[in-house]
Amino acid sequence: MKALTINPETKQIEEIEIEMKANTVYTFFNSILIDELNTLNQHLIYSDANALSQGKKPFFLGEQLILGNALIVGQMGMEESDANIPKAELEALIDYDVNAFYTEVLALLSQNDINLYRTFELFNGSETIPLNIEWVLYTFNMADEKTKEYFLTELKKALDAGEEMTEHLKKMAQLALNAAQ
């Protein structure tokens, strides 16, 4: 099966042949903790869930923050298939320039065992909204400088106090939702 890999350290996209078995993705990352993202139409993006705690280099694929290497395979329904996005098109979607806000937040969060993509639910009026920590970072990154500084200050306080990070970031997500109303 044709797959694509992205290495943010070398800024290279490589086309590889893999045989999809039960342990192929785990072997590729040498990890049993894998994140599976479906940001690309008809493709699955796999990344190492340990990349944050290991301080792996971040990059954006479209607006999706990804840490460390990525493995991309095609997806037809529930089945994995050849990756069919042209390399040039994939390259156009990648941004290796990660700003200071993201860099600082990721460095702080790397001290904890959290997952950027695991969903949690918040309430916005009577509506239940599934969100994740990556959305929280994206939302606060779009804010003005004063709000970004508030986010960083509160994050540092929470870390110093030994707060549970996922719960702290849920509170920040709720603040973002409330501000959007």
Image (spheres, rainbow, N blue to C red):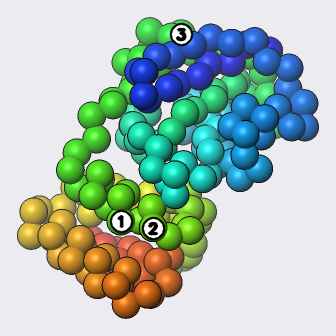
Picture coordinates of residue 122, whole percent (x, y): 50, 78
Q: What whole-number distance in Å separates the C-alpha atoms at marks 3 and 1?
A: 35 Å
Q: Are marks 3 and 2 in contact (CB under 8 Å)?
A: no
Which residue in the structure is indicated by mark 1? 108
Q: Quick check: 24 left or right of 178?
A: right
Q: Secondary structure at mark 1?
A: helix
Q: Which residue is mark 3?
A: 86
Q: Quadrant of the N terminus?
A: top right
Q: Quadrant of residue 98?
A: top left
Task: Tell me which residue sits at (29%, 84%) in the image.
Answer: 157
Residue at x 29% of width, y 53% of height: 102
Q: Nearer the viewer, mark 3 or mark 1?
A: 1
Classed neighbour count for the residue bearing mark 2: other residues with Cα under 10 Å, few (<14), some (14–19), many (≥20): some
Q: Going from the N terminus, do you reach mark 3 or mark 1 first?
A: 3
Crowd around label 1: few <14 · some 14–19 · many ≥20 (10 Å)? some
Report the residue at 50% width, 64% height from top: 132
What residue did someone put label 2 on?
Answer: 111
